[in-house]
Amino acid sequence: IVPRERPPPAFVRHHPSISESCRSLTYSLTHSLSHTHTHTDRQTDRQTPDPAEMEPDRPIGYGAFGVVWSVTDPRDGRKVALKKMPNVFQNLVSCKRVFRELRMLCFFKHDNVLSALDILQPPQIDCFEEIYVITELMQSDLHKVIVSPQPLTTDHIKVFLYQILRGLKYLHSAGILHRDIKPGNLLVNSNCLLKICDFGLARVEEPDPSRHMTQEVVTQYYRAPEVLMGSRHYGAAIDVWSVGCIFAEMLGRRILFQAQSPIQQLDLITDLLGTPPLSAMVSACEGARAHILRGPHKPPSLSVLYMLSEGATHEAVHLLCRMLVFDPNKRISGSDALLHPYLDEGRLRYHTCMCQCCYSVPSGRVYTRDFEPEAERPFSHSYEQSLLSVWQGKELIHRFITEHQQGKRVPLCINPQSAAFKTFIR
């Protein structure tokens, strides 16, 4: 098997060592997540005229733009995740942001990107204030795995990094910048499957360099230098930088650039990469550029990356150095990073025993034509140009949810009599 050549469908006999390695890989992570009870499930389609009531079970996560609970789907008894999006209609900015995230969750069709399984039936538009979205339920996230005492082997790192980049390639091919890639936004389950989540800060990439973009993006530890230096326009390279930081964090089991302020963050980056040339600071604001030039010239010290762990091999550090490039124009893309030989084993393991795009038959395994598919079409955000008021946004979102539910499945609604409901709505 030569994964990078993306072979056509073919019968490939099972490789005993790979199959056994996959079993041990998933067992070790299952053991580390044994205190949780959740699992990933697909829901079946059923249709009856009356909505089914859903009750929150327990909280599983809190974010800047919502809370996520584990719930039981009354239609089939399976565990799913329920995300509440509150304060949707406070102002036009929040209205646009939530509508964008909602449309993205319904747009995504990729194994390594979290998508919406369903949306709860909204009340009448006059009482419509919150949105509830159902997604697959994952057992943990990469942050919890990294800080746990569970050994994180090279095999784990390769298969996780492969899935992150696989999902990122899909997002970027749809024209979407995530803008908040961090370990806590990478959900994992006991089978080592990984999904990128939390698209509250995501937006469509802006091709016009004269159009300004917000700098209040990405958790500081994973923020690319062009954002730290005040660039008013950036692209998909900011997500690749974040993935590079996560790669190093998996290798060393500690945050690579852990600073107290954006300026200190920039200093830590230049300590490792060296003082950047002026050509790499063209889009930087004057203050950030002056800060760099005032300081002493720093030579690169990339050799310290080999000290992260025994897993920091030549191949690993080579890929890491391609991701952690100061100049975004010279930083490797997510698609090109997938072609790096370091990820060959991760690709093989993922498609041998983990993915849903390939399948097994008695004589072996049938592999897909495209191991890392792109989006079928770009994500459209043309609707945002005509969204001029909060009330108009409320009408559009209400109509979108209603149309999304038509003819699909039994509608769901929250059970307000549930003992957990009052806690959930706080």
Image (cartoon, rainbow, N blue to C red):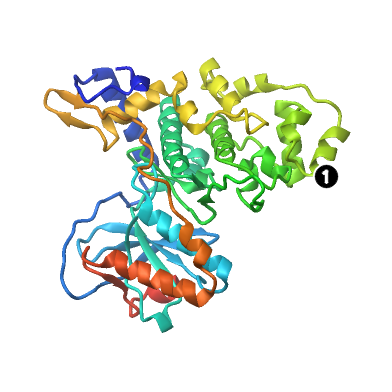
Residue 79 x/y as whole percent: 29, 57
Q: Is residue 358 left or right of residue 183?
A: left
What residue do we see at 21% from left, 67% from top? 410
Amino acid on which the number 1 mark rests in the picture: Gly
Front-most of residues 244 and 201: 201
- Residue at x 18% of width, y 30% of height: 360
Residue 264, located in which quarter of the rendered image?
Answer: top right
Evaluate whether residue 126 shows in this view: yes
Q: Residues within 10 Å of mark 1 (few under 14, many from 20)?
A: few
Q: Which residue is mark 1?
A: 287
Seen from the viewer's position, the closer of residues 336 and 324 is 336
Q: Quadrant of residue 158?
A: top left
Position of 3 with respect to 176 (left or right) is left
Can you name the residue that lies furthest to the left here? Answer: 362
Q: Is residue 117 above or below residue 11?
A: below
Residue 390 or residue 47, whichever sits in front: 390
Percent x, y of residue 309: 56, 24
> If the image is split into quadrants, where does the N terminus sit?
top left
